[in-house]
Image: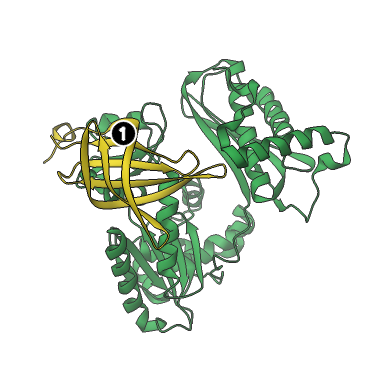
Chain colours: A yellow, B green
Amino acid sequence: MVRCEDIEGPMIETINEAVEVVSVCTNGKMHPLRLRWNGKVVKVKRITGEWVKSEGEAKVYYYSVLGENSDYFEICYDSRMLVWTLCRVWLEG
Amino acid sequence: MRTIAHVDMNAFFASVEQVFNPRYKGKPLIVCGDPGRRGVVSTASYEARKFGVKAGMPLQEARYLCPNGIYVEGNPEKYVHVSLKLLEIYKNFTPIVEPFSIDEAFLDLTGTVYEGEAARRGAILIKKRIGEEFSLTASVGIAPNKYMAKMASGLEKPDGLVQIDGEDFKKIFWKRKVEELWGVGDKTGVALRRLGIDTIGDLAKFPINILRAEFGINGEKLSDMANGNDDSPVIPYYEGIPAKSMGHEYTLNEDTDNAGRLERTILRLSDQVGRRLRQEGYLGDTVTLKLRNSTFVTITRQKKLTGHTDEDRIIFGVAKGLFKENWKKEKIRLVGVSVSGLVKRGFCLPESLFRKDEKERKVLEVIDGLRDKFGENAIVRAGAMRS
């Protein structure tokens, strides 16, 4: 039987840093393609989820994405400030 | 005969988190408030449930049972986003969809191609679409009314599909404990057992006049529930369901008997409740204060106003009064403020309009305007800020 103590603990890190993101807009939806963080360019392999948060009149668009090494990134685009932010990461290894 | 489906998303918050971050898949994931604070479990993934973690459990207990579980802060916007997308799927099967909560919905399939025997095929298609588009699973119950459909969806979890009729309901549920009825809690269960009612079947056959004498109008309702009777309609999403009450509650970082701190918490909660009432266009005439002490004893006390209101100041005044009357100086763990007796603004005018406090009303309009434009934290009452 698996004991809870044997299970690997969380490895997600909060970052909250401005990042550069290359994205395309199609059919009124934005799709992040690449992001630059820590001097490295991460190619977005898959968008696993998205949601929107309203802050007053401004909208912040959030994306959960997987990089090529299955690294997990949570990024958001603030439509008022026109900035992309890397919110959280979970890096392989 | 009607055909009603109840769709219940399985471990919704945790499942959404596992889909959004595939690293969480297969791991015991616990969605809660701020994991660094105290509070309760909102949803536990099925992997966490194996260790005994369940919704509503204090985080402290969950951490004891599952110390290496992954504790993540719930993200309401994320779940609402998925919930609205799910509604789009349901609308392909019938226009009469009632979102019952963020992760549950009733669908009236009567008169559609998925009526009667075909409902099972419809449910399979709904589950398939949910799986394909979101990698999520749902349990679906199909029955001639909402109550039986809701009970049926709980029979197979996760990823279940159960269709029942009145006879099936009796066969399946009558032998079960009365607490297994949707809507019967522990307290009602104890009261029913005092009458010698142990099973749902006992309740179904129990003389209704005695139930009425014991439980008032709820006596009849209990009998209907046990017999699987329910003629309530599925209220389509576009009609909206009028709110009965609005409230907020807050678990403090640590139990406290500091009166100032507790009053500041009540002020902040009153502010949030008033804001929500105004945003959604409601006025209420009853203020309720909830206090839970460090031994988990909870009291709720309410006071009816002389008129209707949506103003923070009035809500706070009443809640503070209830606090002073009922707080026994013991350490408090959780505080809640809610307003009930709601009516839509327009059907009733706020009490304050008849008094000379237009100034307060104007201040509220300015505060609401700032929050509409810049977000909820754009302006905060000074009295609520001190720690």
Side (left or right) of B169 relative to A9:
right
Residue B254 place in picture, x, y as percent: 45, 20
Question: What percent of the width, then of the height, locates residue B283?
Answer: 72, 47
Residue at the spot 32% in from the left edge and 64% down from the top edge: B130
Viewer-closest of B49 and B360: B360
Label 1 crowd (10 A; few <14 / some 14-19 / many >=20): many
| Left or right position of B268 against B49 | right
Q: Is residue B350 above or below residue B241?
A: above
- What element does badge 1 sit on? helix
Which residue is label 1 attached to?
A: B62
B320 relative to B259, above or below: below
Amino acid beneath label 1: Ala
Total numbered badges shown on the rendered structure: 1
B10 is higher (above) or lower (below) than B87: above
The residue at 57%/15% (across/down) is B258
Q: Chain of mark 1?
A: B
Q: Is residue B17 visible?
A: no
Return the x and y of residue B319 as percentages of the image width and height: 68, 31
State the image quarter where residue B167 is shown: bottom left
The answer to whether any part of residue B51 appears in the image is: yes
Q: Position of residue A69 (x, y in %)?
A: 14, 43
| A10 lies left or right of B219 | left
What is the quadrant of the C terminus of chain B in the image? top right
